[in-house]
Amino acid sequence: MSQLRFAASLSRLGTESAFTVLARANALAAEGHDIVNLGIGQPDFPTPPHIVEAGIAALRDGHHGYTPANGIPALREAVAADLARRHGAEVDPGHVVAVPGGKPTMFFAMLMFGEPGAEILYPDPGFPIYGSAIAYSGATAVPYPLSETLGHAPEAEAILSRITDRTRLIVVNSPGNPTGGVMPKAEIDALVAGLAKHPHVAILSDEIYSQMLYGGREHVSLLRYPEIRDRLILLDGWSKTYAMTGWRLGYAVWPEAAVDHVTRLCINDHSCVNASAQYAGLAALTGPQDAVAEMVAAFDRRRIVTVEALNALPGVSCADPGGAFYAFADIRGTGLTSMDAQTLFLEEAGVATVAGTSFGANGEGFLRISYANSEANISKAIERIGAVLAAR
């Protein structure tokens, strides 16, 4: 009988339920069931060939060893150039830190600012790792609701009204997961103006979906606001934009005061990022962008199909998502809880979705539908859901 004594801090770690749903969906598929997966949040496109070839070439060229903890210089310079091109913001490559995916930046930010007695604000519903990492740090996780009026996007007042003397960090995610909500420029302006009264508060801006916007919407990066640059952490990366989820490559732009701290965290945590992945990321930023435009156009078409089909279901309504590749369907009219709906649709309709409560208490009554699947599969899946609802 094991007598291992684990640290109490492990009990504060949450999880990402989309992977639990994926595991169950895969198990059902292995049993012979026809499963349509609208649960997992990753592009269903392959990594563009020129990026793959760059990664292979790096291995053939002998890039087999350690790299600088913050990333190879050429990659960090390319990130800075890309941000200048897309956001009109000058970034010092020395403030760019490459990491294996998006989550290390989240964890490092929480560890840097979170401790007992501190408070960190995060969106609810929101990416579940925010709350998990905050709790692990020992800080108090303070959720703020998203505005349904703004299409399930952050609202400045909802954030500013929750700031206290204990607040160390706020998390903003736009375009957002799980809702696809895009924070309007007027709200961002109001948030930045309000933060002038709270100079002790840092900002983690998760902009991983920044190139996936629809309906003429504009992504307004917090990098554009010089008055908060000395306390802004920008999170972005390659996973979504370039269909590189398995390459595990992301980056953040850190304020000058935090660069040495985060570099030491990298050294202690993972030493450095996979060398060949960094050369692939360099090719992604400096090479042709046609595949990105084609993928986003495909997501846009799927978005329209998804929203129209969901709004035709009994007891279901769905706001138009402004970005990312998620629809946040309101199922309150069906009488089902989010978790009951997730289970019912997977077990009886063969459709994987993710309960809104997987993203926080404010997600009750909603389901996240990922339209990172073909239009044919999306239509088939929602038709199956409709049949199950009609039979109840």
Image (cartoon, helix red, strand yellow):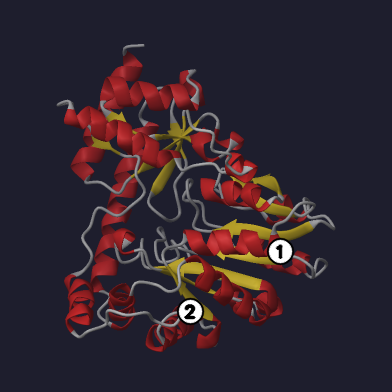
Find residue 190 and name its label: 1
**Residue kind at label 1, given as amino acid type:** Ala
Q: Which amino acid does label 2 sit on?
A: Asn
Q: Is residue 41 above or below residue 336?
A: below
Task: Report whether 137 appears left or right of 99.
Answer: right
Q: Residues within 10 Å of mark 1 (few under 14, many from 20)?
A: some
Residue 148: in sight, yes or no?
A: no
For numbered disc 1, what is the local secondary structure?
helix
Q: Nearer the viewer, mark 2 or mark 1?
A: 2
Q: Separation of disc 2 and disc 1 at Cα?
A: 33 Å
Q: Residue furthest top?
A: 392
- The quadrant the C terminus occupies is top left
Residue 331, x across and y down, in percent = 47, 27
Identify the residue under disc 2. Answer: 70
Count of number-bearing discs: 2
Give the mark nearer the N terminus: 2 vs 1.
2
Looking at the image, is 223 positioned above or below residue 244?
below
Residue drawn 32% across the image and 26% down it: 346
In this picture, is 287 found above or below 141? below
| Residue shown at 45% from the left, 63% from the top | 208
Specify the quadrant of the image occupied by residue 275.
bottom left
The location of residue 246, given as percent across then percent down, is 30, 59
Picture quadrant where residue 364 is located: top right
Q: Is mark 2 on a helix, strand or loop?
A: loop
In which image quadrant can residue 382 be found?
top left
**Considering depth in this image, is 354 or 255 the residue closer to the camera?**
255
Percent coordinates x, y for residue 111 in the rendering: 64, 60
Is residue 354 at all visible to an observer of this figure?
A: yes
Seen from the viewer's position, the closer of residues 322 and 103 is 103
